[in-house]
Image: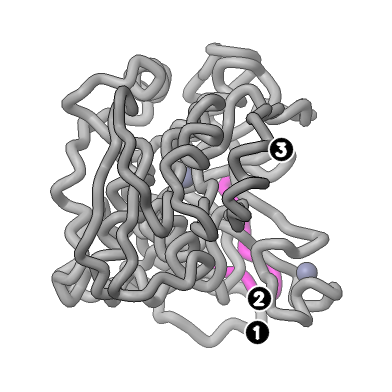
Amino acid sequence: MKAARLHAARDVRVEEVPTPRPGPGEVLVRVRVVSICPSDLRLYQDGHASGVVPDHPMIQGHEFSGDIAALGEGVEGPPIGTRVAVEPSWHCGNCDMCRRGYHNLCRNIVFPSFPQRDGALAEYITCPAHSVCPLPDSVSYVEGALTEPLGVGIHAVRLAQLSAQDHVAFLGAGAIGMCTLQAAKARGVRRMAVVEPLEGRRLEFDVVFECSGSNEAVEQAMQLARPAGRVIVVGIPHPDRVSFDSTIPRRRELTVIFSRRSRDTLSEAVELIASGRVDVKSLPTRHFTLEQVAAAMEATAARPADMLRAVVTP
Ligand SMILES: [Zn+2]
Ligand SMILES: [Zn+2]
């Protein structure tokens, strides 16, 4: 099969590699759409992901959809040809965190595109059967790929324990910010503000979602929260180390929650899109071929105003 493999920072090559075979409990997915996440840029630009260095030319891409192409041993469905989306956070089901229901915090978590597990920028990928969800005909492959950022938003909104009366702010109007806002709206929240960029706002919010991934925005989110308010950090701060004035969360007795990826959100994401309660189609996309993966990565890094996701069709 054809795959886009990262040999070093900013060095992506489309190469012929063996098509993977689904093992027991796995399915083979023919990839149709991969959307590029800003979190993919760290490996692409730096050649490592938070210090973890690939031990082979990595296939990136974790937001994807496609068709079931083969079933591994012991897997009874979905039938070959079924259009599916995938929750790309693969838990073991046996460790202490899995047994407590924290699947996204699994001690043995496998995340395709994070070293050393190859991702989806290829014609095929194998996935655990439990990680796929069939897509209704009304949900496109692009929307199927966008169930991943929507799942991140759904997970953050669950962690925030929002009530319909809450006055909520979102820092960052990228795909994660928009998906988190739509997930909150689908929960009945009506009083919402999006801050992008942050200059000069002095409103006080019950709940603030940091979705920008900007390092300074963590403190800015705390400044926007009212006493006894909640701050949910969804964005991935870059660089990793964050500093803030501790008097802000201390004097206000803020609850600060860090959200990790998503947890068992895929079927809700598909349902929200299929029912029209969430509209991910409105996120502006630009389309690229597998040969243009480097251009898709560079476009993501450039953060153009008219594109929230670069979409690759292998
Ligand atoms: Zn993502
Ligand atoms: Zn586990």
Tag 2: Cα neighbours inside 10 Å, few (<14), some, or many (≥20)?
some
Q: Kindly identify the residue that appears in the image at 68 percent across and 45 percent down.
A: 117
The residue labelled by disc 3 is 115
Is the residue indicated by label 1 positioned so its CB lies within 8 Å of ligand 2? no
**What's under tag 3, amino acid-wise?**
Pro
Query: Hey, which quadrant is residue 42 in on the image?
Result: top right
Given residues 289 and 45, the one toward you in this image is 45
How many numbered marks does the figure carry? 3
The earlier-in-sequence mark between 3 and 1 is 1
Query: Hey, which quadrant is residue 22 in on the image?
Result: bottom right
Secondary structure beneath label 3: loop
Mainly helix, strand or loop, the magenta region?
A: loop
* Rendering coords of residue 73 (x, y %): 66, 78
Q: In the rendered view, does 231 fall on the left or right side of 150?
A: right
**What's under tag 2, amino acid-wise?**
Gly
Mark pair 1, 2: CA separation:
6 Å
* Depicted 282 relative to depicted 312: above or below: below
Q: Kindly identify the residue that appears in the image at 54 percent across and 35 percent down.
A: 218
Asked whether residue 275 appears in the rendered view, the answer is yes
The earlier-in-sequence mark between 2 and 3 is 2
Q: In the rendered view, does 22 fall on the left or right side of 216?
A: right
* Depicted 200 relative to depicted 120: above or below: above
**What's under tag 1, amino acid-wise?**
Gly
In the drawing, what numbered circle is on residue 25? 2
Tag 2–tag 3 contact (CB < 8 Å): no
Tag 1: Cα neighbours inside 10 Å, few (<14), some, or many (≥20)?
few
Given residues 312 and 308, the one toward you in this image is 308
The residue labelled by disc 1 is 74
